[in-house]
Image: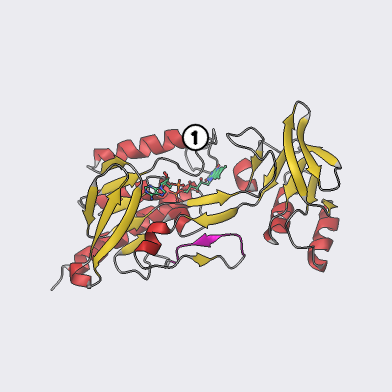
Amino acid sequence: MAVIGGGAGGLAASIALARSLRSVIVIDAGSPRNAASAHAHNVLGHEGVNPLGLLAKGRQEAEAYGVQFIDATVLSAANRTQAPETLGFDLETSVGISIEAKRIVIATGLTDVLPDIRGWPTGGAIPFFTAPTATATRFRGQNIGIIGTTAMSYHQAMMFSQLSDRVTFLRHNAPAPDEAQRRMLDSLGIVYVDSAVEAVERTESGTVVTLRDNDSMTFDALAVGPYFRANGEIFEQLGGTVVDHPTGMGSSIPAEANGATDVPGVWAVGNSADISAMVVASAASGVLVGAQVNAELIMSSVS
Ligand SMILES: Cc1cc2nc3c(=O)[nH]c(=O)nc-3n(C[C@H](O)[C@H](O)[C@H](O)COP(=O)(O)OP(=O)(O)OC[C@H]3O[C@@H](n4cnc5c(N)ncnc54)[C@H](O)[C@@H]3O)c2cc1C
């Protein structure tokens, strides 16, 4: 069994498989999506845990069950055959190690593609965030600017209005509000600014946003809806097709509720298959898929 990606989804899948006495190898490039965050929230029993610390602990637990790890990127994957009884895959890694696997769990997560705005943060230089659920306490009551990217940004503004009565919606690339969205903004007291954002800059007094007409506004923090692009290259090499999310907010590997994809022998977990999965949901999907793959392997050995 090969698990590609060692975030919450991949680690949980590897543990579930190894506990069923499957031989498992995890190949992980080591860039979980929330690596830059100091704390992960809504992680039951571990509220505020450091994301990398949580994964290090998960890896230790996996190793204790015999899971092997390769710190590398899977560069390419090929199906040896699509016949159910002889399913098999060949993987090539960035460290020159080749791997043969009977089944593959894709746990490669997604990439947050941020809007093209001058001065946009790298390395956490500007406090910005995407989901109110992950940041509820930190920015409570603050002066928050929402940078619109899609129609779903209005929903994001609505959610943030529960955390603060100082929310401003900067339209940027989002479509103009329809009547219902306009009513929602008005009734929740969200200030609407119909302008693109040219630049952002962190200053001592806050985050300064320069608008297209050169006006500027200062916020305590910014929220933005990135494009959530599935890391689906390996899936596509194996013959699958990554699909657009119906909201236009991103893309994902199409998988059934049990993680099965339409490529025989290939399963998908976590953010690669579900743009909305947070840490616990990603781990939960990994546990489920681990059990499903184990059952499928037992079934395939029944003559
Ligand atoms: C800024 C930010 C803050 C967040 N805060 C929270 C929070 O507070 N609480 C919460 O529950 N969720 C939070 N999330 C969401 C959380 O990051 C995801 O739910 C979680 O990381 C998904 O786990 P995953 O295993 O699917 O993917 P990831 O954690 O992204 O792991 C994917 C792994 O696969 C590896 N990989 C990718 N391609 C390859 C390849 N070809 N070969 C080998 N390895 C590969 C990557 O390097 C990475 O290590 C936050 C997200 C962001 C962006």
Residue 216 drawn at (x, y percent): 84, 40
Q: Which region is colored magenta? A: 248-254
Report whether 27 appears left or right of 254.
left
User: Which image quarter holds the C terminus?
Assistant: bottom left
Please give the name of the residue rendered at 79% of the width and 62% of the height, measured from the top-left corner.
176
Report whether 233 appears left or right of 85.
right
Which kind of residue does numbered mark 1 sit on? Val
188 versus 145 height, above or below: below
| Number of numbered discs visible in the structure rendering | 1
Magenta-span inclusion, residue 255: no
Quadrant in which residue 235 is drawn: bottom left
Residue 96 drawn at (x, y percent): 26, 44
Q: What kind of secondary structure does the magenta stretch mostly adopt?
A: loop
Residue 160 visible in the shown view:
yes
Few, some or many C-alpha atoms within 10 Å of disc 1 (few <14, some 14-19, many ≥20)? some
User: Which image quarter holds the N terminus?
Assistant: bottom left
238 versus 135 height, above or below: below
Residue 172 drawn at (x, y percent): 75, 53
Please give the name of the residue rendered at 49% of the width and 59% of the height, measured from the top-left corner.
274
Quadrant in which residue 206 is drawn: top right
Residue at disc 1, secondary structure: loop
Report whether 73 appears left or right of 123.
left
Is label 1 within 8 A of ligand 1 (CB to nearest ligand atom)? Answer: no
Name the outermost residue toward the left: 303
Q: Which residue is mark 1?
A: 49
Report whether 248 appears left or right of 18.
right
Name the outermost residue toward the top: 204
**Residue closer to the observer: 108 or 114:** 114
Magenta-span inclusion, residue 253: yes
Please give the name of the residue rendered at 41% of the width and 51% of the height, measured from the top-left corner.
108
